[in-house]
DNA sequence: ATGTGAGCGTACCGGTCGGTACACATCAAG
DNA sequence: CTTGATGTGTACCGACCGGTACGCTCACAT
């Protein structure tokens, strides 16, 4: 790897690094991995430094505090998921079409950002005060996307209802996939998304015939 | 409270305590609450002792280790959920009937044992070695209940399919309710369960008419 | 050549961590 | 009255916690 070579030889490669990671970015990345792996409280700041290749003192040059690190990490993730969801809402047409694409994008985000997702799901409540409020607000905005698309479906006459409980039920099914969704599994993420969208749209029960022949 | 009176007066009340909690039971209960509130790593053993009304030394007379405590707590919860699920499977008739009751029982368990549920969801991966294996096996047994009832539905000709992805989707919707399910909310737990069961059985989409009038 | 400041490491702070050793208390059984 | 089991508190351990102080290096501008 080029960084290792740099470190070994001491030759400064000063410019034109295309996708080099800044220290700040690297800290956010490894913090997501460590927090996901061992939990927020279970990860020490020294451990974060080790994973980022710097010492505790240097780490605190970049991050205000451990909780601040958790917050910036979580906020960045939710904001990006929100942006992707809004892009879908802006481009797709029809409630069913928007819904299917929203589900796809949701699962893609979960699959691509596994560490961040685990951190947000498990460690969000470790945030305190204003930081907790801000993150909750962001997540509510995301929930609103699904509420909107279900409501559009009802107005189109395509969907039965769009009460909050249906919104929460749908988001619950999608969110919990973070536990078992495997981007390297035999079934692609997009196909899983489509199957789950079908499940939500049609349900498991076949249209019931009256007086079933038995 | 009678315990307080005992402690104050020093009069031993030796027998006939109907629902008195043993120290061991009390430790399990408060550990669930503390672990749910502050996380496994975020909760110190001294804190557990305080909550249980004993000191660290006495705590370790009862619990082997902190991880052992987490394990016994989690196992007890999953085993009880499993027992309740199996009772439903034994008593209810028909795939739809079994399914609806299974969903009800699932949400009732989630609502009654909020602390334990949060602990299992968030801290299960803090278990190591044999303990982690045992708990995973128990959770798989529970998943099997839903796989079975969906399969029965397919054999009855009532359900579309019962692939693992549908099982996981259903369980995902139900499990994630632990985040927002409120036993003291305006909608009862049983009603929420019925609404979610409807959502899974029928889906959100209305049976589509051909060439919709628009 | 000198100054500047970003970036980093070392050393250290007070406090808490999980866990153990051991003496003391209680009480039922002998 | 003695003994052994059960339960508890006190004191202590080494390790680690999150965070800070401070000095060093080095690229760069003046």
Image (cartoon, coloured by chain):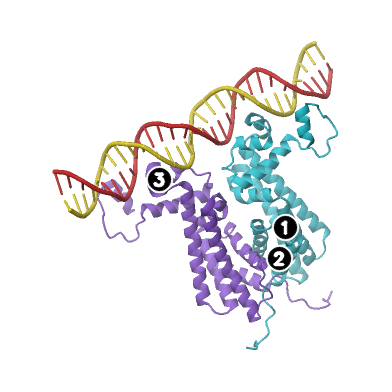
Chain colours: A purple, B cyan, C red, D yellow
Q: Callout 1: residue from which chain?
A: B
Residue drawn at point x = 72 percent, y = 38 percent: B26
Q: To which quarter of the image does residue A120 belong?
A: bottom right
Residue on which disc 1 sits: B107
Left or right: C11 with respect to A106?
left
One can see residue A191 in this view: no
Q: Earlier in the sequence, mark 2 or mark 1?
A: 1
Name the residue nearer the viewer: A43 or B6.
B6
**What x and y, as percent, mark residue B208?**
67, 81
Q: Are there few (<14), some (14-19), or many (20+) residues within 10 Å of tag 1?
A: many
**Alpha carbon distance from label 1 to label 3:** 44 Å
**Badges 2 and 1, same chain:** yes
Do the CB atoms of the residues marked 2 and 1 lie less than 8 Å apart?
Answer: yes
Q: Secondary structure at mark 3?
A: helix
Q: Nearer the viewer, mark 1 or mark 3?
A: 3
Residue on which disc 3 sits: A60
Residue on which disc 2 sits: B196
Q: Is residue A75 above or below residue B161?
A: above
**Alpha carbon distance from label 2 to label 1:** 10 Å
**What x and y, as percent, mark residue A207?**
74, 76
Residue drawn at point x = 66 percent, y = 67 percent: A164
**What x and y, as percent, mark residue D23?**
28, 36
């Amino acid at each position: 790897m080029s960084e290792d070579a740099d470190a070994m030889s001491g030759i400064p490669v000063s410019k034109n690094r295309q996708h080099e990671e800044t220290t700040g970015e690297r800290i956010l990345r490894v913090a997501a991995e460590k927090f996901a792996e061992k939990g927020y409280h279970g990860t020490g700041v020294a451990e974060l430094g080790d994973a980022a290749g710097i010492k505790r003192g240097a780490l605190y040059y970049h991050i205000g505090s451990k909780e601040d690190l958790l917050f910036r990490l979580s906020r960045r993730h939710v904001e990006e998921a929100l942006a992707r969801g809004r892009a879908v809402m802006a481009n797709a047409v029809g409630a069913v079409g928007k819904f299917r694409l929203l589900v796809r994008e949701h699962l893609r985000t979960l699959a691509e950002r596994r560490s961040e997702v685990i951190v947000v799901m498990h460690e969000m409540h470790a945030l305190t005060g204003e930081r907790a409020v801000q993150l909750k607000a962001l997540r509510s905005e995301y929930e609103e996307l699904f509420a909107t698309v279900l409501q559009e479906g009802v107005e189109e006459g395509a969907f039965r209802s769009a009460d909050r409980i249906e919104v929460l039920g749908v988001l619950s099914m999608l969110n919990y996939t973070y536990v078992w969704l495997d981007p390297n599994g035999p079934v692609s993420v997009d196909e899983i998304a489509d199957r789950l969208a079908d499940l939500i749209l049609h349900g498991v029960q076949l249209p019931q015939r009256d007086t079933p022949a038995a």
